[in-house]
Image: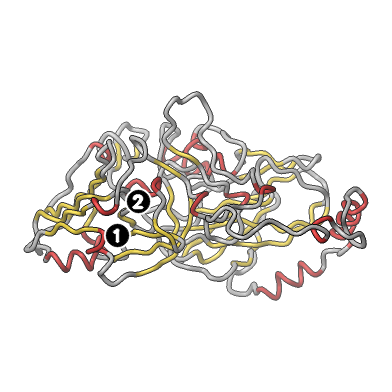
Amino acid sequence: MENHSSLSRRTILRRSAAIPAASIALGTAAHAQSSSGLPPAVPESMRTPGGPFLNPPYGLPSEFEKGVVRVLPAGNNPFPTGSRTPLQSLHGIITPNGLFFERHHAGVPKINPDHHRLMVHGMVKRPLILSMEDLMRFPSVSKIHFLECSGNSSSQYTGPSGKTAQEIHGLLSCVEWTGVKLSTILAEVGVDPKAKWILAEGTDAAAMTRSIPMNLAMGDAMLAYAQNGEKLRPEQGYPLRLFLPGIEGNMSIKWLRRLKIGDKPFYTREETSKYTDLQPDGSSFEFTFLMDVKSVILTPSGGQKITKGFHEITGVAWTGYGRVKAVDISTDGGKTWRQSVLQEPVLSKALTRFRFPWQWDGNPVIIQSRAIDEAGNVQPIRKKIIDKRGTNQIYHYNAIQSWKISETGEVTNVHA
């Protein structure tokens, strides 16, 4: 593997420049011969005026992008509890609000923000009940962070299950969050120095509750009321949710109505019967909050088909430990690795886009990405995870994803 510190963007660009231009241009020419309205012909769109403004008042994607949608889990579940982001169809690092993955436990409640209240009580000097208007008067912050369900990619524990990146890894999104720092509200109520935990409770029919360590609450935790410049969508917790950057998604309680300050964990249903990490000996780890370093190649990826010639391998990497430091690419099933270019900005606890120029010779290959974060964590191979955790597991799967490209160019999900 090449030294991370010595490999520059200029080196990557030189490699890319060496790719024959004809490998791209020939494909464009072939497409032009089979299409109409292309230069030098005048297309119909230049002959007829387009549609009016504000139709509809809230903008929608082009009708030609109708396939870029969230999908529900496969199977016959009469009450599906989540949908998945089409990662392989997105660009950059920001997830549009309409494509942000969903996860809920008792449906999406309809809440009038004028009637919503947040109660903060327990081991505090000044218990408060705050309206949304009250909360929005506090100083606000906006930060770009990912959110990932701890069960994301869990089908890979037992076998190469799922076809596309969306089906396998789609419980992951990244947006700009806006809200009030939780530490600001805690300072307002005056937390008892002996308090170590906070119970966060949602307004949904599941009364979703989790115990939050005080050190997380006093860090970069946020009471979020907006994402990507607009108010939260109902399925994302409208009008208010807790948001904990880099922490398993289940703890970022949606439709937040109550924060109770205490001196010990509250051991709720969701952190005893659920969201613990079962070990091969039958024991379970509790409170494994942080999401580990992880990456996935999105182009080429499962369900796609490529042709011989030049391709840019691209995907996203992320880590709950801070920033992604590097992403290595293998085009021979992990035998050798070369460093990709990280697209700016490289932010803490956010998706990071990586890019790597590649010439496919038409022979079957397995491509992989391996992320390394600033804390020194390296994305592991699947065998290492299975040897440690076994396959009777649900949460925190972060092994290297392998995509096999056949001689026909079809890309499939495999274990390598």
Residue 180 x/y as whole percent: 29, 65
Instruction: Locate the N terminus and report the quarter of the image it occupies.
Output: bottom right
- Inspect the image, locate mark 2, and give the three-letter code of the amino acid beneath it: Tyr
Residue shown at the point (33%, 57%) measured from the top left = 244
Residue 376 is at least partly visible in this image: no
- Inspect the image, locate mark 1, and give the three-letter code of the amino acid beneath it: Leu
On screen, residue 356 versus residue 344, left or right, reads: right
Mark 1 falls on what kind of element?
A: strand
Between circles 1 and 2, the one closer to the viewer is 2
On screen, residue 251 versus residue 353, left or right, reads: left
Question: In the figure, 177 relative to 414: above or below?
Answer: below
Instruction: Locate the C terminus and report the quarter of the image it occupies.
Output: top right
Residue placed most toward the observer, 247 or 203: 203
Residue 186 x/y as whole percent: 18, 64
Residue position marked by numbered label 1 in the rendering: 223
Residue shown at the point (47%, 68%) measured from the top left = 347
Residue 338 x/y as whole percent: 66, 61
Disc number placed over residue 163 in the picture, else none: none
Question: In the figure, 313 relative to 16: above or below?
Answer: above
Residue position marked by numbered label 2 in the rendering: 238
Mark 2 falls on what kind of element?
A: loop
Q: What scheme was used to colour the molecule?
A: secondary structure
How many badges with numbers are in the image? 2
Residue 278 x/y as whole percent: 34, 36
Q: Residues within 10 Å of mark 2 (few under 14, many from 20)?
A: many
**Distance Cα–Cα, label 1 vs label 2:** 11 Å
Residue 157 is at least partly visible in this image: yes
Question: In the figure, 310 relative to 154: above or below?
Answer: below
On screen, residue 34 versus residue 227, left or right, reads: right
Q: Earlier in the sequence, mark 1 or mark 2?
A: 1
Residue shown at the point (21%, 59%) measured from the top left = 214
